[in-house]
Image (cartoon, helix red, strand yellow):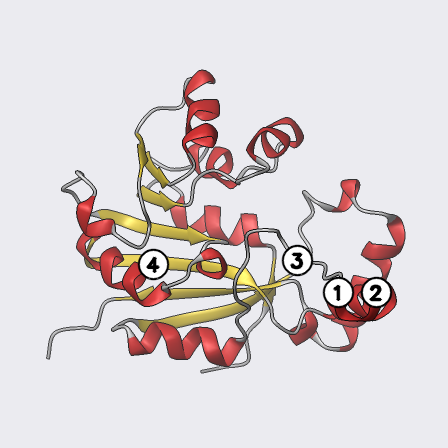
Amino acid sequence: MPSPPLVQRVEFVTAICRGRSVLHLGCTNHPYTAEALRSGTLLHSQIQAVASRVVGFDADAGGLETLRQLGVTDLHRADLERLDAVDVAETFDVVVAGEIVEHLANPGLFLAGVRRFMHPASRLVVTTVNAYCGLRFVLYALRGRGGTREPVHPDHVAYYSYATLGLLLRRHGFHVDECAFYDLGREHRPHNPWYYNLTNDVLVTLSRQLADGLVAVCSLPREP
């Protein structure tokens, strides 16, 4: 596989979703759904703007209700590690798992459940934070209080790298068609201190594998 390029996460994901039916797994942003809506950074809204149809699954009842109050439909409360129990019987052109695998105690069960929502031409798009993100390394080194204060989302239980994410997907029966690193999002830059953005840009210019996150685009194995 060629060296992964550096992309913008939202632009990359929405380009794949454009004009297609999409299942968005982890469609809220617990516990920051309201803040993401106010700042215009909620991925579900970005996908809705380009897809032909979007269905959202999430375990966060409060976040789903926040979306419903804004008129968002086709939302289902779901345990993403028990997708076999969800009462939706259809397949989608694209399944987006945006920033969700790092929240899961059992990502294998999650990936096994995803397959029922895919047809032979479907694509699974997985995005996650990069274990080797340079900006987080710098913040942890300077502000980590001896290792007790990490620059990490309060609901994350794992980090993935290019190698470990690819292995996880292959082990659970997916063909990895494409990988990319994603840069610090344009949608987040206005809300960051200027020196965060500058530190990121210097590090990523030196080495793009120090970027903010990873994207993997996958398909089901082709029949022999």
Disc 4 + disc 3, Cβ < 8 Å? no
> Residue 141 at x, y = what percent?
83, 71
SS of the residue under disc 1: loop
**Mark 3 = which residue?**
152
Amino acid type, label 1 = Thr
Amino acid type, label 4 = Leu
Q: Nearer the viewer, mark 4 or mark 3?
A: 3
Residue 106 position by quadrant = bottom left
Q: Nearer the viewer, residue 142 or 133?
A: 142
**Mark 2 = which residue?**
145
Quarter of the figure with the C terminus? bottom left
The circle drawn on residue 148 is 1
C-alpha gap between disc 3 and disc 2: 14 Å
Q: Nearer the viewer, mark 3 or mark 1?
A: 1
Q: Is residue 217 above or below residue 21?
A: below
Disc 2 + disc 1, Cβ < 8 Å? yes
**Mark 4 = which residue?**
124
C-alpha gap between disc 2 and disc 1: 6 Å
Q: Nearer the viewer, mark 2 or mark 4?
A: 2
Quarter of the figure with the N terminus? bottom left
